[in-house]
Structure formats: C-alpha cells, structure tokens
Image: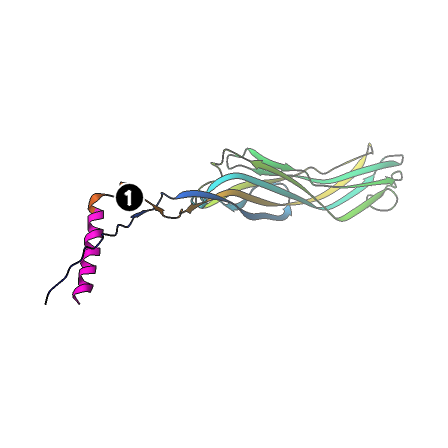
Amino acid sequence: MHRHLSKIPIAIFAIAASIAPTVSAEAASLKYQSSVNVQKTNYFHKFVTLPKFNPELGDLTSVKLTLNGEVQGSIKLENTDASPANVTADLAAEVKLLKPDKSILLTTLPTASKSQEFAADDEILDFGGTSGATFNNLSSTETESTVFTSGFDLFKGLGDLFLPVTAEAKSKGTGAGNLAQVFNTFAGAKVEIVYDYVVRIPKKEPKKRVPESQIPLGALVAVGVCTLLKSKYYRLV
C-alpha cells in the first residue's frame, strides 16, 4: 500500500494570556443600635454594646454616631411665698455618650418644661390647690449626631465596642423666692452607629490574544507537531 503524504500547513494558534485583575469599588453601609433602658438618675456606669467594623469587609469611609437621650418623670411644686408667683420648672437630664477613656463623644439635654401661675402660700404643703401643682407622666427626647471621616482606630477590629453612658439630673424650678419642689427624674439612651465603607470587588478583564511574535518558539513547535500528527492519522485511516 503506497502511502501518500501531502504537504500539510502548520496551523499556529495564539496562546491566550489573562490580564492581571483590576479592582472595582462598591459603596455599602452597616447599621447597629444599642440602648440603656429608662431608669432613675443619676447613673455613671452604664454601657452600650456595638459591633466593631471588620476591616476585611472593605475600606471604612465614615462612621456616624447618633445619641437619642430621653427623660421621664414628675414635678411637684408649691409656692411658699407671701405673694403670687409665676413658676417655671424643667424636668431635665444630661445624657452623655463617652469613649472608653471617658472623654465625651455626644451630649444631650432632653427637657420637659411646665409653667403656671400660683397663688400666695396657703400654708399647706400638698403640691396642689391654688399655690401648688403636681405634674406626672412628663417626657421628652433630644437627639445629637456626629460623623467621623478619619481616625477610625476606635471603631475598627473584631468583637464589640463598649461605650459608657451617663445620665445626670438637671431638673430645676424658678420664679418664686420660696419654692418647694420635688423632682423624680428618669433617663435612658439609644445609640446608633452607621459604618459607611467601600467593598473591594476583583474584576477580571476578557482574555487578550498575544501577538504571534511574542509566543515562545517551543509553544509554536508543539502546536504545529500536534496538528501534523492529527492530519497524518486521518489520511492513514
């Protein structure tokens, strides 16, 4: 059997090379809340617990802290002056959010106010009648916020962030030289933290053909030999 072997052109295929991945960015945010229940003032050793920002999630761009302070309670007033008086009273509490080193992050002063004209002293200390009054179920809130755009060391890491909260009564009454007053002051706090950050997303670009002039000679020879053997096999069969 005569075997005829024709000239077979060697097909050369460009070898693909992938370009190094680039990185795109996507904005994201996380929000957490913690609170101290409303309770009798004064207190100085309460805490809110908030998760720290995990740096593996991306690059932190800002941290927003919000403190919502709340005051509740009652006011009792009695004008003991010999003449009528216009009395004003404030049920108030100074609520603070602190850093672990006790420096101040945020302060609020929620205040519930009452004003009333009282007659002269009626010689009965009952916080009622024409010379006195009792105000129950009072409440008020106040909110303050701050935003950090640098200096994130306090907020970054694994685990939780423990921030102290304090509440100190600032209730007072004015308007009479002789004024009997009783305050029951309760306060609470709600704290919110928002982490704004950028997520790093690896992005692969389409494969790019390498010019034949840049293909190693060994790779070209290997491709050509494979093509030749394949063609020879088909003719013999």
Q: Quadrant of residue 65?
A: top right
| Residue 225 magenta | yes
Examine the rendering and report whether any part of residue 197 can be seen: yes
Q: What kind of secondary structure does the magenta stretch mostly adopt?
A: helix
Which residues fall within the magenta stretch?
A: 219-237
Q: Which residue is drawn at 51% across and 38% down?
A: 61
SS at mark 1 in the image: helix
Q: Where is residue 32 in the image (x, y as percent from the top left)?
A: 55, 48
Q: In this orientation, which residue lies closer to the viewer: 166 or 5?
A: 5
Query: Measured along the vertical axis of the image, is residue 28 above or below residue 177?
Result: below
- Mark 1 burial class by Cα count in 10 Å: few <14, some 14-19, many 20+: few
The amino acid beneath tag 1 is: Glu
Image quadrant containing the N terminus: bottom left
Viewer-nearest residue: 219 or 20: 219
Q: Position of residue 75 (x, y in %)?
A: 76, 44
Q: Mark 1 points at which residue?
A: 212
Question: Which one is in front, 158 or 224?
Answer: 224
